[in-house]
Amino acid sequence: MVEAVLYATENPLSAGDIASVLGEGKEEVARAIKGLTKDYRDRATSLTIVRVGIRYKMQLKNEFSEIVTPVSKREISNPELRILGFVAANAGCKRGDIVQRFGESSRKALDDLINRKFLSPEKYRNTEIYGVTKEFYRYFNIGKKELETKVSRLSGAQNDE
């Protein structure tokens, strides 16, 4: 039952969330999650159960992502991904920076990313500045420090060129 809930959910759930859905005890659900996690790790399967903070989610193992790309539905468009990457690498960038870099069509993508809670706008003079949100970190399964480290490494590599 725990496996079915993890499979069906779009968002990560805590053991308590799953226990509420199933009408089971939290400890029993936590044991089931631990057993499922080990089972998926031990089997030759394309799926895994990942922990995101105190929540869990079933997902495809990273090494299978490229294989399924041609048949999977994109949740985030390429223009949106480029904007997310830019904002993640340039926290505090202004709306004008984004529009200048990605064109007028980026305004709709930017608004969609805000509505989906991937970006947070903050008023700054007569414009807005942007940063990524907790939802961004959850969705991409990356921590703030890990992102900062990767951005720093990429910046260093570009400076070396």
Image (cartoon, rainbow, N blue to C red):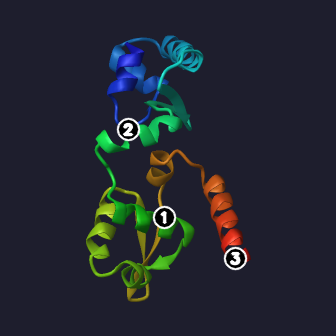
The amino acid on which the numbered mark 1 sits, given as a three-letter code, is: Gly
Q: Count the marks: how many?
A: 3
N-terminal label among 3 and 1 = 1
Disc 1 target residue? 85
Q: Is mark 3 on a helix, strand or loop?
A: loop
Q: Distance between the Cα atoms at labels 1 and 2? A: 22 Å
Q: Is residue 56 above or below residue 97?
A: above
Q: Distance between the Cα atoms at labels 2 and 3? A: 34 Å
Q: Where is residue 97 in the image (x, y as percent from the top left)?
A: 44, 83
Q: Viewer-proximal residue, 72 or 22?
A: 72
Residue 57 quadrant: top left
The amino acid on which the numbered mark 2 sits, given as a three-letter code, is: Val
Nearer the viewer's eye, disc 1 or disc 2? 2
N-terminal label among 1 and 2 = 2
The amino acid on which the numbered mark 3 sits, given as a three-letter code, is: Glu
Q: Residues within 10 Å of mark 3 (few under 14, many from 20)?
A: few
Q: What element carries label 1?
A: helix
Callouts 1 and 2 close, C-beta under 8 Å: no
Disc 3 target residue? 161
Which numbered circle lies on residue 14? none
- What residue is at 47 percent from the left and 26 percent from the top? 46
Q: In this view, does 1 lie above or below 12?
A: above
Q: Distance between the Cα atoms at labels 3 and 1? A: 20 Å
Q: Position of residue 150 (x, y in %)?
A: 65, 59
Lateral position of residue 31 relative to residue 22, left or right: right
Which numbered circle lies on residue 68? 2
Q: Where is residue 16 in the image (x, y as percent from the top left)?
A: 46, 24
Q: Where is residue 126 in the image (x, y as percent from the top left)?
A: 38, 89
Q: How crowded is mark 2: few (under 14 residues within 10 Å), some or many (20 or more)?
A: few
Quarter of the image where the N terminus is located? top left
Q: Residues within 10 Å of mark 1 (few under 14, many from 20)?
A: few
